[in-house]
Image (tube, helix red, strand yellow):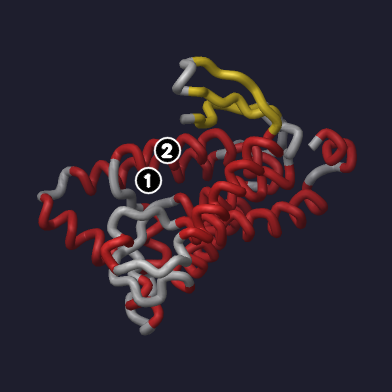
Amino acid sequence: MIFPVGDEQIRGGYKPYISYALIGLNVCIFLFQVMMPVSQHEAFIFTYGAIPREIMGGVDLFTLLTSMFLHGGWMHLIGNMLFLWVFADNIEAVIGNVQFLVFYLLGGLAASVAHILFNVGSGIPAVGASGAISAVLGAYLIMFPRSRVKVFVAYFFRSFHMPALYFLGLWGVQQFANGLITIIPRDESAYTTGVAWWAHIGGFLFGIIMGYFAKKTYLPVTQRDYA
């Protein structure tokens, strides 16, 4: 298993208050979840998670937003928050606090739309910040492709650096490959243990598009050469 633990710090004019606030909010909401009795927790997920079948019917559209702040378990939360902590601050430092918050939420919505379009009949709630975080990864790939990402390889229990272009590029290819596999017909039970690959893909593509415009708008010409 390979996962990021740090990156080069790209200097910008804004402190990443929103990035850290999002991490804190996600953690607090998850702690609230785990303190619930099992039956109440299940009802909570079905109430605030985004259920494709209901969204397509125009029901509970607010869950497109609330589902971004729910998680299915400790590893789900920790993995998402680790990626958010490593990659989000540099983007926010460059584009600004308010702009980053808008970008993050729109990225999550784009991810949910992609997931729903490929799972129209599902009655299983989708939860997690991974769609919005995928948008962050897509934007980072375009804005800072030469930034060196520190990755930890659990198998060898050691870390090394690699360009963001390679790390995030490989991550994106993996999402597309797994997303294509899910197109193969399957029964409803397959949703219960699956990953929302198309949410990752939708968010990632949204981030790539927005990252292109952000790079042209916010990064000085001198930093574009570095990035």
Q: Quadrant of the C terminus?
A: top right
Q: Which mark is residue 82?
A: none
Image spot of residue 129 (x, y percent)? 43, 51
Task: Write down the quadrant of residue 12 in the picture.
Answer: top right
Q: Residue at x 36, y 67 (%)?
A: 186
Image spot of residue 19 (x, y percent)? 52, 42
Image spot of residue 151 (x, y percent)? 56, 26
According to the image, label 2 marks what residue? 79
Horizontally, residue 154 falls left or right of residue 9, namely left
Q: Residue at x 18, y 58 (%)?
A: 42
- The kind of residue on which mark 1 rests is Asn
Horizontally, residue 150 falls left or right of residue 165, namely left
Q: Nearer the viewer, residue 27 or 179?
A: 179
Q: Residue at x 21, y 60 (%)?
A: 44
| Callout 2: SS | helix
Q: Residue at x 61, y 19 (%)?
A: 160
Q: Nearer the viewer, residue 121 or 29?
A: 121
| Callout 1: SS | helix
Q: Is residue 169 above or below residue 205?
A: above
Q: Residue furthest bottom?
A: 57
Q: Nearer the viewer, mark 2 or mark 1?
A: 2
According to the image, label 1 marks what residue? 26
- The kind of residue on which mark 2 rests is Gly
Q: Nearer the viewer, residue 179 or 160?
A: 179
Q: CA distance from mark 2 to mark 1?
A: 12 Å
Image spot of residue 83 (x, y percent)? 51, 38
Task: Write down the quadrant of residue 103 in the picture.
Answer: bottom right
> Label 2 neighbourhood size at 10 Å, few (<14), some (14-19), many (20+)?
few
